[in-house]
Image (cartoon, grey):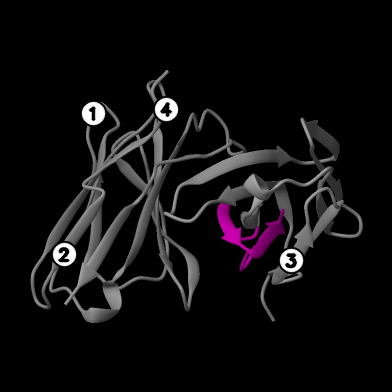
Amino acid sequence: KAGVTQTPRYLIKTRGQQVTLSCSPISGHRSVSWYQQTPGQGLQFLFEYFSETQRNKGNFPGRFSGRQFSNSRSEMNVSTLELGDSALYLCASSLADGRVNEQFFGPGTRLTVL
Amino acid sequence: KNEVEQSPQNLTAQEGEFITINCSYSVGISALHWLQQHPGGGIVSLFMLSSGKKKHGRLIATINIQEKHSSLHITASHPRDSAVYICAVLSMDSNYQLIWGAGTKLIIKP
Protein backbone atom coordinates (compact mmCIF):
# COMPACT_ATOMS: atom_id res chain seq x y z
CA LYS A 1 0.00 0.00 0.00
CA ALA A 2 1.24 3.48 -0.76
CA GLY A 3 1.84 5.68 2.26
CA VAL A 4 0.42 9.06 3.06
CA THR A 5 1.42 11.62 0.46
CA GLN A 6 1.50 15.39 0.80
CA THR A 7 1.91 18.01 -1.88
CA PRO A 8 3.72 20.21 -2.33
CA ARG A 9 6.74 19.28 -0.23
CA TYR A 10 8.08 22.82 -0.09
CA LEU A 11 6.37 26.14 -0.55
CA ILE A 12 7.45 29.76 -0.29
CA LYS A 13 4.81 32.47 0.02
CA THR A 14 4.69 36.10 1.09
CA ARG A 15 2.67 37.69 3.84
CA GLY A 16 -0.97 38.20 2.97
CA GLN A 17 -1.12 35.43 0.41
CA GLN A 18 -3.15 32.28 0.83
CA VAL A 19 -2.01 28.69 0.45
CA THR A 20 -3.61 25.28 -0.06
CA LEU A 21 -1.89 22.07 1.00
CA SER A 22 -3.00 18.61 -0.03
CA CYS A 23 -2.92 15.25 1.71
CA SER A 24 -3.77 11.86 0.25
CA PRO A 25 -4.29 9.23 2.96
CA ILE A 26 -3.48 5.55 2.82
CA SER A 27 -6.08 3.71 0.78
CA GLY A 28 -8.98 2.73 3.00
CA HIS A 29 -8.20 5.26 5.71
CA ARG A 30 -11.11 7.57 6.42
CA SER A 31 -9.61 9.93 8.97
CA VAL A 32 -7.12 12.67 8.15
CA SER A 33 -5.57 14.88 10.83
CA TRP A 34 -3.46 17.97 10.27
CA TYR A 35 -0.66 19.22 12.51
CA GLN A 36 1.60 22.25 12.55
CA GLN A 37 5.16 21.86 13.75
CA THR A 38 7.29 24.86 14.64
CA PRO A 39 10.58 24.93 16.55
CA GLY A 40 9.11 26.98 19.37
CA GLN A 41 5.72 25.28 19.77
CA GLY A 42 6.38 21.69 18.78
CA LEU A 43 3.55 19.74 17.21
CA GLN A 44 0.13 21.35 17.42
CA PHE A 45 -3.14 19.78 16.35
CA LEU A 46 -5.05 21.72 13.72
CA PHE A 47 -8.09 19.59 12.86
CA GLU A 48 -9.30 16.13 12.01
CA TYR A 49 -11.63 15.14 9.20
CA PHE A 50 -13.60 11.94 9.03
CA SER A 51 -16.02 11.06 6.22
CA GLU A 52 -15.91 14.62 4.85
CA THR A 53 -16.80 16.15 8.23
CA GLN A 54 -14.60 18.03 10.65
CA ARG A 55 -14.63 15.87 13.77
CA ASN A 56 -12.09 17.67 15.95
CA LYS A 57 -10.55 21.11 15.92
CA GLY A 58 -7.53 22.57 17.67
CA ASN A 59 -6.98 26.13 18.84
CA PHE A 60 -6.09 27.88 15.61
CA PRO A 61 -7.62 31.04 14.15
CA GLY A 62 -10.24 30.91 11.44
CA ARG A 63 -7.58 31.64 8.81
CA PHE A 64 -6.83 27.93 9.01
CA SER A 65 -9.47 25.78 7.37
CA GLY A 66 -9.73 22.42 5.76
CA ARG A 67 -11.96 20.03 3.96
CA GLN A 68 -12.13 16.39 3.01
CA PHE A 69 -13.38 14.92 -0.22
CA SER A 70 -15.39 11.77 -0.80
CA ASN A 71 -12.19 9.86 -1.65
CA SER A 72 -10.79 10.88 1.79
CA ARG A 73 -8.20 13.23 0.30
CA SER A 74 -7.95 16.35 2.37
CA GLU A 75 -6.87 19.91 1.78
CA MET A 76 -5.82 22.54 4.25
CA ASN A 77 -6.05 26.23 3.46
CA VAL A 78 -4.39 29.14 5.21
CA SER A 79 -5.52 32.61 4.24
CA THR A 80 -3.82 35.95 4.86
CA LEU A 81 -0.50 34.33 5.66
CA GLU A 82 1.60 35.65 8.53
CA LEU A 83 5.32 35.20 9.17
CA GLY A 84 4.46 32.98 12.12
CA ASP A 85 2.71 30.51 9.84
CA SER A 86 6.12 29.33 8.62
CA ALA A 87 6.20 25.72 9.75
CA LEU A 88 6.17 22.09 8.76
CA TYR A 89 2.59 20.98 8.15
CA LEU A 90 2.02 17.29 8.67
CA CYS A 91 -0.98 15.21 7.91
CA ALA A 92 -1.73 11.78 9.26
CA SER A 93 -4.30 9.21 8.28
CA SER A 94 -5.90 6.40 10.20
CA LEU A 95 -8.60 3.81 9.70
CA ALA A 96 -10.68 5.49 12.40
CA ASP A 97 -13.04 2.55 12.65
CA GLY A 98 -12.92 3.21 16.37
CA ARG A 99 -11.45 5.88 18.54
CA VAL A 100 -8.12 4.20 19.11
CA ASN A 101 -6.31 4.04 15.82
CA GLU A 102 -2.67 4.27 14.87
CA GLN A 103 -1.88 7.30 12.80
CA PHE A 104 0.41 7.17 9.79
CA PHE A 105 2.18 10.36 8.85
CA GLY A 106 3.03 11.95 5.55
CA PRO A 107 6.40 13.57 4.82
CA GLY A 108 5.06 17.06 5.48
CA THR A 109 4.89 20.32 3.59
CA ARG A 110 7.44 22.90 4.65
CA LEU A 111 5.90 26.34 4.28
CA THR A 112 8.06 29.45 4.44
CA VAL A 113 6.34 32.82 4.65
CA LEU A 114 8.50 35.80 3.71
CA LYS B 1 2.59 22.07 33.43
CA ASN B 2 2.51 20.18 30.12
CA GLU B 3 0.19 17.22 29.93
CA VAL B 4 2.91 15.09 28.34
CA GLU B 5 6.46 15.41 29.61
CA GLN B 6 9.47 13.73 28.05
CA SER B 7 12.93 13.30 29.44
CA PRO B 8 15.65 13.87 28.66
CA GLN B 9 15.23 16.68 26.12
CA ASN B 10 18.59 15.86 24.56
CA LEU B 11 20.66 12.72 24.74
CA THR B 12 24.06 11.99 23.25
CA ALA B 13 25.48 8.49 23.54
CA GLN B 14 28.12 6.25 22.00
CA GLU B 15 27.28 3.57 19.48
CA GLY B 16 26.29 0.37 21.23
CA GLU B 17 24.89 1.96 24.37
CA PHE B 18 21.49 1.10 25.80
CA ILE B 19 19.16 4.09 25.48
CA THR B 20 16.11 4.94 27.57
CA ILE B 21 13.70 7.78 26.87
CA ASN B 22 10.90 8.49 29.32
CA CYS B 23 7.40 9.86 28.93
CA SER B 24 5.01 10.86 31.72
CA TYR B 25 1.47 12.09 31.20
CA SER B 26 -1.22 13.53 33.40
CA VAL B 27 -4.41 12.90 31.40
CA GLY B 28 -6.58 9.85 30.91
CA ILE B 29 -5.48 8.05 27.80
CA SER B 30 -6.68 5.27 25.58
CA ALA B 31 -3.31 4.72 23.91
CA LEU B 32 0.22 6.08 23.72
CA HIS B 33 2.32 6.50 20.60
CA TRP B 34 6.07 6.56 20.23
CA LEU B 35 7.15 8.21 17.00
CA GLN B 36 10.46 8.94 15.33
CA GLN B 37 11.28 12.05 13.33
CA HIS B 38 14.43 12.32 11.25
CA PRO B 39 15.93 15.59 10.02
CA GLY B 40 13.85 16.64 7.03
CA GLY B 41 10.61 16.16 8.89
CA GLY B 42 9.11 12.72 8.15
CA ILE B 43 7.45 11.11 11.15
CA VAL B 44 7.32 7.37 11.54
CA SER B 45 5.09 5.63 14.03
CA LEU B 46 7.18 3.18 16.08
CA PHE B 47 4.63 1.84 18.54
CA MET B 48 1.10 2.34 19.69
CA LEU B 49 0.42 0.72 23.04
CA SER B 50 -2.19 0.79 25.74
CA SER B 51 -0.71 -1.73 28.17
CA GLY B 52 2.36 -3.84 28.83
CA LYS B 53 5.26 -4.00 26.47
CA LYS B 54 5.96 -4.16 22.74
CA LYS B 55 9.18 -5.06 20.96
CA HIS B 56 10.25 -4.44 17.39
CA GLY B 57 13.83 -5.25 16.50
CA ARG B 58 16.11 -3.28 18.82
CA LEU B 59 13.26 -1.11 20.07
CA ILE B 60 11.21 -1.86 23.16
CA ALA B 61 8.33 0.23 24.50
CA THR B 62 6.71 -0.23 27.89
CA ILE B 63 3.80 1.47 29.55
CA ASN B 64 2.58 1.55 33.14
CA ILE B 65 -0.99 2.81 33.11
CA GLN B 66 -1.23 3.14 36.91
CA GLU B 67 1.90 5.28 37.07
CA LYS B 68 1.06 7.13 33.81
CA HIS B 69 4.52 6.49 32.49
CA SER B 70 6.05 4.97 29.39
CA SER B 71 9.62 4.26 28.32
CA LEU B 72 11.23 3.69 24.97
CA HIS B 73 14.41 1.62 24.98
CA ILE B 74 16.92 1.16 22.20
CA THR B 75 19.38 -1.71 22.54
CA ALA B 76 22.75 -1.74 20.77
CA SER B 77 22.23 1.84 19.56
CA HIS B 78 23.54 2.84 16.15
CA PRO B 79 24.21 6.22 14.52
CA ARG B 80 21.20 5.67 12.24
CA ASP B 81 19.03 5.77 15.40
CA SER B 82 19.85 9.47 15.68
CA ALA B 83 16.53 11.29 15.46
CA VAL B 84 13.92 13.03 17.55
CA TYR B 85 11.71 10.60 19.47
CA ILE B 86 8.26 11.87 20.31
CA CYS B 87 5.73 10.53 22.77
CA ALA B 88 2.08 11.34 22.06
CA VAL B 89 -1.00 10.24 23.97
CA LEU B 90 -4.51 9.70 22.67
CA SER B 91 -6.39 11.63 25.30
CA MET B 92 -9.86 10.65 26.42
CA ASP B 93 -10.09 14.03 28.16
CA SER B 94 -9.60 15.90 24.88
CA ASN B 95 -12.00 14.02 22.63
CA TYR B 96 -9.32 11.54 21.58
CA GLN B 97 -6.94 14.13 20.18
CA LEU B 98 -3.24 13.33 20.19
CA ILE B 99 -1.36 15.34 22.80
CA TRP B 100 2.32 15.59 22.02
CA GLY B 101 5.44 15.60 24.12
CA ALA B 102 8.20 18.03 23.18
CA GLY B 103 10.43 15.26 21.87
CA THR B 104 13.84 13.89 22.79
CA LYS B 105 16.69 14.62 20.44
CA LEU B 106 18.96 11.58 20.33
CA ILE B 107 22.45 11.62 18.84
CA ILE B 108 24.41 8.39 18.62
CA LYS B 109 28.11 8.91 17.97
CA PRO B 110 30.11 6.24 16.14
Percent x, y of residue A86: 28, 71
> Front-most of A11 and A82?
A11
Tags 2 and 4 in contact by the CB under 8 Å rule? Answer: no
What residue is pinned by disc 3? B12
Given the current orientation, which residue lies at the most extreme left position? A17
Distance Cα–Cα, label 3 vs label 4: 37 Å
Label 1 residue SS: loop
Does B107 appear in magenta? yes
* Chain at numbered mark 4: A
Q: Residues within 10 Å of mark 4 (few under 14, many from 20)?
A: many
How many residues crowd mark 1 within 10 Å: few (<14), some (14–19), many (20+)?
A: few
The one nearer the camera, B90 or B57, is: B57
Res B95 visible: no
> Tag 2's secondary structure?
strand
Q: Report which residue position mark 4 lands on.
A: A29
Please provide the residue range marked out in magenta.
B93-110
B39 is higher (above) or lower (below) than A104: below
Disc 1 vs disc 2: which is toward the camera? 2
Q: Nearer the viewer, mark 3 or mark 1?
A: 3
Among all residues in the image, which is located at the extreme top? A1
**What x and y, as percent, mark residue A47?**
38, 55
- Real-space Cα separation, disc 4 to disc 1, in angstroms: 12 Å
Look at label 1 and name its amino acid.
Ser
Name the residue rendered at 23%, 68% in the picture.
A112
Is B23 on the left-hand or right-hand side of A102? right
| Quadrant in which residue A74 is drawn | top left
Instruction: Give amino acid for label 2.
Output: Ile
Q: Earlier in the sequence, mark 2 or mark 4?
A: 2
* Residue located beneath label 2 in the image: A12
In the rendered view of the protein, which quadrant contains the N terminus of chain B?
A: bottom right
